[in-house]
Image (cartoon, helix red, strand yellow):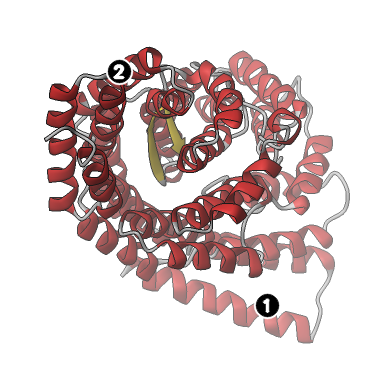
Amino acid sequence: MQQAAFDEAVELLERASSIALEAPADDETMSQLWIALGDARMTAGRVEAARDAYAEAASHLPERSPELVHIALHFHGPSRAGHQDNRHAVLAHRALAVVDEQRDPVTAARLHAQLSLMHDKWAPAQLVEAERAVELATKSGDRHALCDAYRARFWTAEPGRSWEYADAALSAARNLASGDVLLNTFVIALIGAAQCGDYARFRILAQEHATLAEESRLPIALGFSRCIGARMHVTRGELAAAESLANEALEITSDQTVLLTWGVIQLHLLRMKEHHDDGAAMLQSWFDANIVPESAQLLCAAALALRLAEGGQREAAQARLDDFAANDFARVSDRRNWLHTAELAVMSDLCAALGDRLRADGLIELLRPWEREHLQVSVSEDCGPAALHLGRLECVNGRLEDAIAHLEYSLAETTEGEAWWKACESKLELGRALLQWGDDRRARVLLDEARTFAQETGLLLLARRAEQAAALLPR
């Protein structure tokens, strides 16, 4: 019912704007009309259309108009994912020119936080803006400003610290009346919990997010909550349930954030079902349609190369890995970039699939700062503990003692967290390492457990690999 009311309001404002355009009014009237339309579109979850309306409103406003502040603070919408919009940066700078930072540190802090989120790739200006936001927000003590500032600082955090800023942002958001702010802040709190491998906290936060989403009835919140639920089913190896929830999310909204999250989950499922050609075709279609954000170009290119390698096109995949690894993996984003660890996870899988000893050491060095963390693709995918990837790469280079230590840690982490998919993968890789080490007895147990779980849950890629490894055991 609430969604129908949102849609009706948007349609009425769309008609009003059409009438106004046919008989243009003065700039002040036009700007107010476009702002109202932008607000309505954003409430209805039509984020891109809302941004177009806000940009049109701004074109009718004079410099130093107070309305610029409203537009800049609402332009970003409910998430930071997707293509960054250069119009937002222009608006935020125009809005900052209106604000006296000494007299209004609250608004200034929120605008600096917005500016910090506008870089599609890591840039030092992100950290400068985020730190200024925290400074001003702390000075003001305002909960909304603190929430925005700590969210900005979360995306600029160094390894091992992002969860602190996520918790600080969530603490501030819980004391606000705005459900939208709380919903958005839950997303970074979820990522922070996932990075720490705190699966229990992730489940609790996900349930809270789902409850808030149902209460809000906002399409993007409802769709995203389904995506988060789908990710949890993936983590437990419940493929059918994951696919069902992901599809349900797409039926609720076609917002770009939800669409890309749905795509990541689908790619995950296709890979485990060994539909590598289909996965490669899906990724290539994204590139062809130009819907891959600049920040995700390397991640998606590496994911495509992985599908090629696992689908038998090893030469093409190797050529792509060689390109990624040029100049000591210079194309890999800064470690404070939001997809840095996801890039490392996918490239590690690619390197292991190709058995590339030369590239393994470079990736190991890049992974070391994250040795006790879990690698994430935002909230879309849990790539498992960094230890899983380190152990696999150490196996490639024959350092079995180090590999076994990493994989033992990965198995303990995922088993404790009931992350059965990655626990299965950890058993598979540990079984392979122990087989090379000469511990046939334990290798047999682990490979059998991995194969059984993978067969029962439809993780065909892992089941086949477990069978291949088990075939090397003495009869």
Quadrant location of the C terminus in the rendered image: top left
Quadrant location of the N terminus in the rendered image: bottom left
- Closer to the camera in the image, 304 or 432: 432
Q: Earlier in the sequence, mark 1 or mark 2?
A: 1
- Residue under label 2: 409
- Residue under label 1: 17
Query: In the picture, residue 47 is in which quadrant?
Result: bottom right
Question: Residue 104's spot in the image, x, y percent?
Answer: 70, 26
Q: Is residue 77 visible?
A: no
Query: In the picture, residue 226 is in which quadrant?
Result: bottom left
Q: CA distance from mark 1 to mark 2?
A: 60 Å
Please, is residue 286 above or below residue 359 in the view? below
View extreme (front): residue: 475
Q: Is residue 470 visible?
A: yes
* Three-letter code, disc 2: Tyr
- Closer to the camera in the image, 83 or 92: 83
Query: In the picture, residue 218 is in which quadrant?
Result: bottom left
Q: Say few, some or many: other residues with alpha carbon within 10 Å of mark 1 (under 14 / 14 to 19 / 20 or more).
A: some
Question: Residue 259's spot in the image, x, y percent?
Answer: 47, 62
Q: Say few, some or many: other residues with alpha carbon within 10 Å of mark 2 (under 14 / 14 to 19 / 20 or more).
A: some
Find numbered disc 2 in the image and state the secondary structure of the residue it sits on. Answer: helix
- Closer to the camera in the image, 321 or 161: 321
User: Which residue is at a point 73% across and 36% down the rendered structure image?
Assistant: 326
Question: Residue 235's spot in the image, x, y percent?
Answer: 27, 42
Mark 1 against mark 2, which lies toward the viewer?
2
